[in-house]
Amino acid sequence: MALCLRLELEGKNCAVFGGGIEGLRRAKQLLEQGANVVAYSPQFCKEWQQCKAVCICQPYHISQLKQVFFAAAATDDPKVNQQIVEDCIQKGIVVISSTQTDTPFHPMANRSWSNGTVAVSVPKAPSLALQIATEMAEQTENNYAQKAEKMAVLRLLVQKKLPCSKARELMRQAVQMEADQLEKIIAEMQEEHQTE
């Protein structure tokens, strides 16, 4: 079983290993989330000059993981990336890798809409994942925003008024209903509440 989790990285210490374009992409993503980013690599490509991450010219060493919450293994050496992943797992650090490794975490491109977040993963084409997530968030907003608001109201009502089994069944049925049908059920439940 897999669960999709969103990490709040604002103010968290994050490390990026790799001074190439992939490491830069990861650093920029982390900075956009408000993370404190330190990047390590024996050398950095010129595109890093505009990046606000702290860049340290050193090869990977396990001591660089001290007080790190999240790490990105993005070196051009799969063996080094694998070592970073193994060390992070041992230390309980959330880690992703740009190469095929045994990491328990998998990055996903995400875009928010008014009632949630759409997350998409295309491991072999991460920039495509971002485009898909953006398009899906727009479609979801257009097609489901009103229904999501009605479902939220209905969920609160059924939690207060119905036993668990009946509440679950009604919510399963509600997923298949249109927004106007949900509005009718909500009105009926609110009316019952006022007459009690």
Image (tube, rainbow, N blue to C red):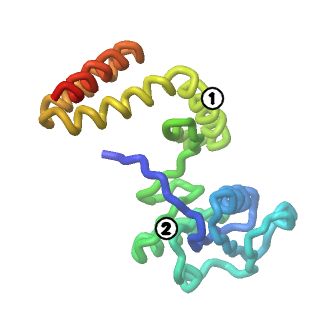
The amino acid on which the numbered mark 1 sits, given as a three-letter code, is Glu
Answer few, some or many: residues within 10 Å of disc 2's Cα (few below 14, many 20 plus, some between 14 and 19).
many
Q: In percent of the image, x 20 and y 31: which residue is there? A: 168
Nearest to N terminus: mark 2 or mark 1 = 2
Q: In percent of the image, x 55 and y 44: which residue is there? A: 123
Location of residue 160 (image quadrant): top left
Q: Are marks 2 and 1 in contact (CB under 8 Å)?
A: no
Give the quadrant of the N terminus.
top left
Work out whether 109 lies above or below 66: above
Q: In the image shown, does 91 or 151 lie closer to the viewer?
A: 151
Answer few, some or many: residues within 10 Å of disc 1's Cα (few below 14, many 20 plus, some between 14 and 19).
some
Give the quadrant of the C terminus.
top left
Q: In percent of the image, x 65 and y 63: which residue is there? A: 34
Q: CA distance from mark 2 to mark 1?
A: 32 Å
Q: In the image shown, does 189 or 4 lie closer to the viewer?
A: 189
The residue pinned by badge 1 equals 135
The residue pinned by badge 2 equals 85
- Dot in front, 2 or 1: 1
- The spot of residue 145 in percent (x, y) is 51, 27
Q: Residue furthest bottom?
A: 63
